[in-house]
Image (cartoon, rainbow, N blue to C red):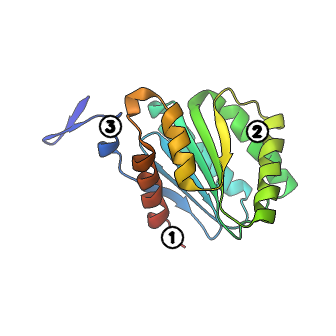
Amino acid sequence: MSIFGDMCYDPWSMADWVPEVAYADADVAIGHAGPVIALFWRGQVRANALQRLQLLVAERSADAPLVMFRIVEAGAVLPERDTRALGAAFFESVGDLIAVSAFVVEGPPMQAAAFRGLDAGLAVLAKRDYPHSVFESLSEAAGWVAERAPERWHFTGESLAATLGELRRLSPR
């Protein structure tokens, strides 16, 4: 533990995690709070967004293992083939830093099916040595992740969902 002013900072306490947006453009927003990283996918994910995500994971790796959420919002577009390959390489490179991962697809059924297929393809290309699953809602994903995250974080589904909700609220549209 370290002291900042008269406050004691505990890197494993959710109360000390300040939600922050690290990158945003018209298509994505990437944020973090403690060891939680979230990608809000609103349009087309491009190579520059994946590079920003990789930089954030590298910066936050002191808090590793990390919890990764990818949230696909209605209207998101499947990435181009080159970007999918970069995504697979990204997940392969950061696998040792991830404790648990959730992929949330909020869009209509046809969009959800396409993104589920994309996620299955990524699983073939990039090995996952951590728990990972796909969900229809952020609250469902938060509950599942809370049950599988390192105990020292004292996650509850509700507190994790609230943190993700705050990151979404902070994300420019």
Q: Report helix, strand or loop for mark 2.
A: helix
Above-or-below relation of 103 to 62: below
| Residue type beneath disc 1 | Pro
Is 90 displayed left or right of 122 in the figure? left
To which residue does mark 1 refer? Answer: 172
| Residue type beneath disc 2 | Ala
Q: Farthest left residue? A: 6
To which residue does mark 2 refer? Answer: 89
- Looking at the image, tell me whether mark 2 or mark 1 is earlier in sequence order: 2
Q: Report helix, strand or loop for mark 3.
A: loop
- How crowded pointer 1 is (Cα within 10 Å; few <14, some 14-19, many 20+) is rated as few
Q: Looking at the rendering, which quadrant does residue 17 occupy?
A: top left
- Quadrant into which the C terminus falls: bottom right
Q: CA distance from mark 3 to mark 1?
A: 27 Å
Q: CA distance from mark 2 to mark 1?
A: 28 Å
State the image coordinates of residue 24 (x, y, percent, origin top left): 56, 63
Is 131 displayed left or right of 116 in the figure? left
